[in-house]
Image (cartoon, grey):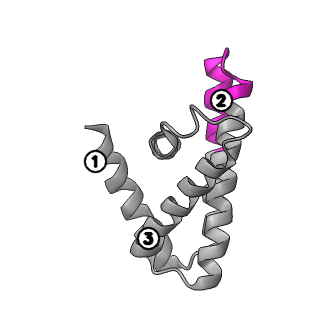
């Protein structure tokens, strides 16, 4: 349960600002944010070109789905939490299919450091 909340907190911190203001015409902002997130991940996890493309697609999907969930469940916080947790779990699962074990360990370290740094 703690891992789900850590993942959710990480996703919320990653998407803070961009998804809260995302509108149908803001695809460019989401694309730029997905590219930036992927670039940071690539620096730490040493992604190959193929992995970079797949992870960027996953990041773009994550940000888009989170923006849609925020719009859809803006009135119901409990449903929003459930939807965001589901989106985050699917993202983590898909990411695990793309990354190698050492890269997953590097990603987990990055995620924990990023979350701890931004909570303060």
Give the residue displayed 70% in from the left and 27% down from the top. 71
Q: Name the residue under label 2.
A: 70
**Which dot marks residue 90?**
none
**Which dot marks residue 105?**
3
Q: What stretch is highlighted in magenta?
A: 70-87
Give the residue displayed 66% in from the left and 37% down from the top. 67
Task: Report crowding for label 2: few under 14, some 14 to 19, many 20 or more residues within 10 A (C-alpha).
Answer: many
Of callouts 3 and 2, which one flags the residue occurring earlier in the amino acid sequence?
Answer: 2
Q: Are marks 3 and 1 in contact (CB under 8 Å)?
A: no
Of callouts 2 and 1, which one flags the residue occurring earlier in the amino acid sequence?
Answer: 2
Residue 77: image x %, image y %?
Answer: 61, 19
- Judged left or right of residue 17, residue 27 is right
Give the residue displayed 67% in from the left and 14% down from the top. 75
Q: Mark 1 points at which residue?
A: 117
Q: Main secondary structure of the magenta part?
A: helix
Give the residue displayed 28% in from the left and 47% down from the top. 117
User: Where 70 falls versus 19 (above or below)?
Assistant: above
- The reply to whether the magenta stretch includes residue 95 is no
Q: Which marked residue is nearer to the observer: mark 3 or mark 2?
A: 2
Residue 79: image x %, image y %?
Answer: 68, 24
Distance from disc 3 to disc 2, alpha carbons, whole Å, reads 30 Å
SS type, badge 2: helix
Task: Report crowding for label 3: few under 14, some 14 to 19, many 20 or more residues within 10 A (C-alpha).
Answer: few
Picture quadrant where residue 118 is located: top left
């Amino acid at each position: 349960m703690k891992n789900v909340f850590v993942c959710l907190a990480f996703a919320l911190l990653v998407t803070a600002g961009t998804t809260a203001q995302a509108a149908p015409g803001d695809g460019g902002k989401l694309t730029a944010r997905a590219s930036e997130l992927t670039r940071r991940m690539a620096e730490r996890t040493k992604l190959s070109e193929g992995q970079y493309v797949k992870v960027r697609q996953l990041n773009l999907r994550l940000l888009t789905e989170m923006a849609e969930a925020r719009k859809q469940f803006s009135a119901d916080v409990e449903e929003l939490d459930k939807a965001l947790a589901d989106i985050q779990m699917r993202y983590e699962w898909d990411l695990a299919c793309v990354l190698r074990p050492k890269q997953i360990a590097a990603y987990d370290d990055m995620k924990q450091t990023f979350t701890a740094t931004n909570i303060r």
